[in-house]
Image: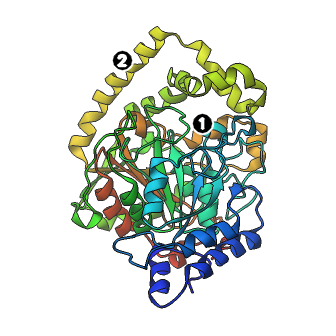
Amino acid sequence: MPNSAPTIAGLHSAYAAGAKPAEVVAAAYARIRAVGDPGIFLHLAPEADVQAAAAHLPAFDPVRYPLWGVPCAVKDNIDVAGMPTTAACPAFAYAPERSAFAVEKLAAAGALVIGKTNLDQFATGLVGVRTPHPVPRNAFDPARVPGGSSSGSAVAVAQGIVAFALGTDTAGSGRVPAGLNDLVGLKPSVGAISARGMVPACRTLDCVSVFARTVDDAFAAYAVMRGFDAGDDYSRPVATDMPSEAALPRRLGVPDAASLMFFGDHAGEAAWQASLAHLKPLVDEIVEIDLTPFLAVARLLYDGPWVAERHAAIRAFLATNAGNVHPVTRAIVGNAGRFSATDAFEGLYRLAELRRATEPTWARIDTLAVPTAPIFPTLAELEADPIGPNSRLGTYTNFVNLLDLAALAVPGPFRSDGLPAGLTLVGPRGSDAALARLGAAFEMPAAERRGATRPAAA
């Protein structure tokens, strides 16, 4: 039987040796009870239902069914038939008749969905605490934020409950929680995975993302889900190569001294330098990059008219249910009224100008490496200031989807205070496989990267 931190490869090895899906399902539910965190799941399928689904799996064939018998979890703004979708707002709840396109792909590949996970309400936030439910506990330090908006999905993987989980990513919600919980966070090229059946945050930017313990696992789930979907107006074809087929990126860009910001977090800065030292031998050239235009793009996401797109996603609900929306979420979305249609067009013009300003950078490098999270806030800091730490967490994530880039967060050496750290690899649209190849080469065994603190799943 696999241990309490399952991986796809480990589970399939166990199945090949005679383990049964019933045992794996039972272990997942036992792990939930052992962890005892009421904030992870907003809806948990009855164990008997998942056991029944496991009993109806076809014969074990990991080639035809690459996720056969693998327990997973799904962020509760993505539809799973038979489970409510709430987006962490009980008054918004509905019962989908059909699973999201991505979830249907997982099920067809043999995955077993055990539940829906907590999130920053309506996927608005990077801290993971903007929920009316108990906040998921960071897997390494319960006094720290779990990261959001995909907080429950990240913690479910970090705590060894499931092998992988789906999140969503608009501003960094599939990367920041990975960085704060010692996980891989794969944010694909925009449109590579259909968003049909997902409650939108910003429809033009939203991505279904993947949390896993290894790059191989994250890419395996991504590879199952990707593909053009005519039913999603924002679905777009993307390269379908695998990491082994992709060229290894050789020219690596890193922020220059003026672009590198840790806001006084010296442990985070030291961990970044340790990650770079580990990454440097894997590439031919390190190029220091002025990130000024990238950071200007990042500011557009919440300081510009894209806030109005968040309002558009839930406008009908807000019209009669504003009092049921988390106060911080309501305040952020309420800023939409500051922007006119003229502002929206001017925002698009400014984005085009800044995108053009970033183009010379991609002539110099193949991949950009940035800190995943430049700070690691405490819950107390968020209580004192619900906005500031959240904004700083998005420093190196907010620009990625606006610029139509792909990204992969990968764990690295731990901080001196025993907390996880890592970096994010960023590349042009369609570079998903190349990022995975470099990320897998950078990836360190957990035993080597952990610091003084270990999660309960270790």
Up-down relation of residue 83 to residue 298 (above or below): below
Q: Residue flagged by tag 1: what amino acid is it?
A: Ser
Residue, disc 1: 391
Q: Is residue 302 left or right of residue 140?
A: left
Residue, disc 2: 349
Up-down relation of residue 184 to residue 321 (above or below): below
Query: Residue 404: image x %, image y %?
Result: 35, 38
Q: Residue flagged by tag 2: what amino acid is it?
A: Tyr
Q: Secondary structure at mark 2?
A: helix
Q: Is residue 161 visible?
A: no
For the point 45% across and 51% down, which residue is it? 102
The residue nearer to you, when weighing 11 against 344, is 11
| Label 1 vs label 2, nearer the camera | 2
Q: Quadrant of the N terminus?
A: bottom right
Give the colouring mode of the picture: rainbow
Q: Is residue 111 left or right of residue 75?
A: left
